Image (cartoon, coloured by chain):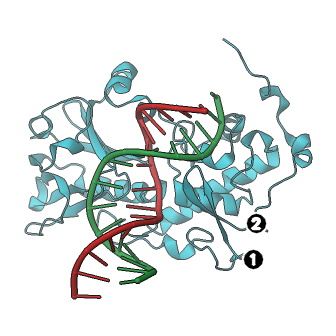
Chain colours: A cyan, B green, C red
DNA sequence: CGCATTTCCTGGAGGC
DNA sequence: TGCCTCCAGGAAATGC
């Protein structure tokens, strides 16, 4: 399940190995992985130079000369790899972009097809993005590695539980089920804690936990649970450092308590109830930002 | 508004 | 060995 660290790892490798290349040809094996504007993608990208590849939330943006940007969402099982000439096609390879340098190919492969690609203009208007890509995908939330304390506090001033809020890509983009649980354990917050209830100290801990967990995971090349591979087709290593995710029944690496599994927002949720107790309502009253408590109408 | 549920899809795991 | 069922989940749509 590619989340921020996996997507960042892939984007950095692609930027290093593919940018500067010119596209010599494009083969689309499955037309329906292209969402949005019904654009002749292959023709549009041929002979265009790849200017830059970077991450935005969980998406990879590939910027071409000639005003085109290819946005890729890897969904659950998506991969983008750089293949050498003659390397056999993996099953479920949907899009191949041939590169000028050493006849290599950039390949998008996605067995479960929860992923997709969109071709948009560099400066596509928000109206167009909403229309062709969808409201949620058009909106870009704050990056968990760059969000300020005040911004994070503002995101949390909602009447929602902390886990569904972190999984919502609208306010904050990049965290998925695995890193959500890892971050909440590191921050010692119960996944069902009402976000509005968090005090300044909690928010600070949450922000620090996000930065620590995500940057350590990037340094480890991401987490390989099943399908994830880097652009060089390597596995990540961070799964060995998971403290709660997929560890139900095992001992908490911090306190030794047995890790529990819950269902939150329809997702498997792993936590240590000793490290992440559900706080009493009264206990947090002192730290709550009351100024955001009023609901603005109109 | 928030939240649970369902939908899309395939491969891997477990039961018998 | 083989068949069956269940399960994983990102994000959208739907209903309460």
**Count of numbered tags:** 2
Q: Secondary structure at mark 2?
A: loop
What percent of the width, then of the height, locates residue A169? 51, 41
Chain identity of mark 1:
A
Q: Residue at x 78, y 50 (%)?
A: A202
What's the residue at 55%, 55% (across, down)? A267
CB-based contact (under 8 Å), mark 2 and mark 1 = yes
Q: Which residue is mark 2?
A: A273
For the C terminus of chain A, the quadrant is top right
Relative placement, left or right, of C10 versus A94 is right
Residue A104: % across, % down: 13, 60
Q: Provide the chain ID for the residue under circle 2.
A: A
Instruction: Say whether residue A110 is visible.
Output: no
Image quarter of residue A233: bottom left
Please identify the quadrant where the N terminus of chain A is shown. Answer: bottom left
Question: Left of A216 or right of it: where is A223?
Answer: left
Pick whichever of labels 2 and 1 is earlier in the sequence.
1
Q: Residue A257 bears which disc, if any?
A: 1
Residue beneath the point at 56% across and 74% down: A241
Q: Which mark is residue A150?
A: none
Front residue (pair A13, A198)? A198
Q: Residue at x 53, y 56 (%)?
A: A177
Residue B7, placed above or below residue A137: below
**Residue A168, image quadrant:** top right
Q: Residues within 10 Å of mark 2 (few under 14, many from 20)?
A: some
Q: Is A82 in front, or is A258?
A: A258
**Is residue A259 something one can see in this rendering?**
yes
Q: Nearer the viewer, residue A283 or A218?
A: A283
Query: Is residue A77 shown above or below A294?
Result: below
Q: Secondary structure at mark 1?
A: loop
Q: Is residue A57 left or right of residue A101?
A: right
Badge 1, how many Cα within 10 Å: few under 14, some, many 20+? some
């Amino acid at each position: 399940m590619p989340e921020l660290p996996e997507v960042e790892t892939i984007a950095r490798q692609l930027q290093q190995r593919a940018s500067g290349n010119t596209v010599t040809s494009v083969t689309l094996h499955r037309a329906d992985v292209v969402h949005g504007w019904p654009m002749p993608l292959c023709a549009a990208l041929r002979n265009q130079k790849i200017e830059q590849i970077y991450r935005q939330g969980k998406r990879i943006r590939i910027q071409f000369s000639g005003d085109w940007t290819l946005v890729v969402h890897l969904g659950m099982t998506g991969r983008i790899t750089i293949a050498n000439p003659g390397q056999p096609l993996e099953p479920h390879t949907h899009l191949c972009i041939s590169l000028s340098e050493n006849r290599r190919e950039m390949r998008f492969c996605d067995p479960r097809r929860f992923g997709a690609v969109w071709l948009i203009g560099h400066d596509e208007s928000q109206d167009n993005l909403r229309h062709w890509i969808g409201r949620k995908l058009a909106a870009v939330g704050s990056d968990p590695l760059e969000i300020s304390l005040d911004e994070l506090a503002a995101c949390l001033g909602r009447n929602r539980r902390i886990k569904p809020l972190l999984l919502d890509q609208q306010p904050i983009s990049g965290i998925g089920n695995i890193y959500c649980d890892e971050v909440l354990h590191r921050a010692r917050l119960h996944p069902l804690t009402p976000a509005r209830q968090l005090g300044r100290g909690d928010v600070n801990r949450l922000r620090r936990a996000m930065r620590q967990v995500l940057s350590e995971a990037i340094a480890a090349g991401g987490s390989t649970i099943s399908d994830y591979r880097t652009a060089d087709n390597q596995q990540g290593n961070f799964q060995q450092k998971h403290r709660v995710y997929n560890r139900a029944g095992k001992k908490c690496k911090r306190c030794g308590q047995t890790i529990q599994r819950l269902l939150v927002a329809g997702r498997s949720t792993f936590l240590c109830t000793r490290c992440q107790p559900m706080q009493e309502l009264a206990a947090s009253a002192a730290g709550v930002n009351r100024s955001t408590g009023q609901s603005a109408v109109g």
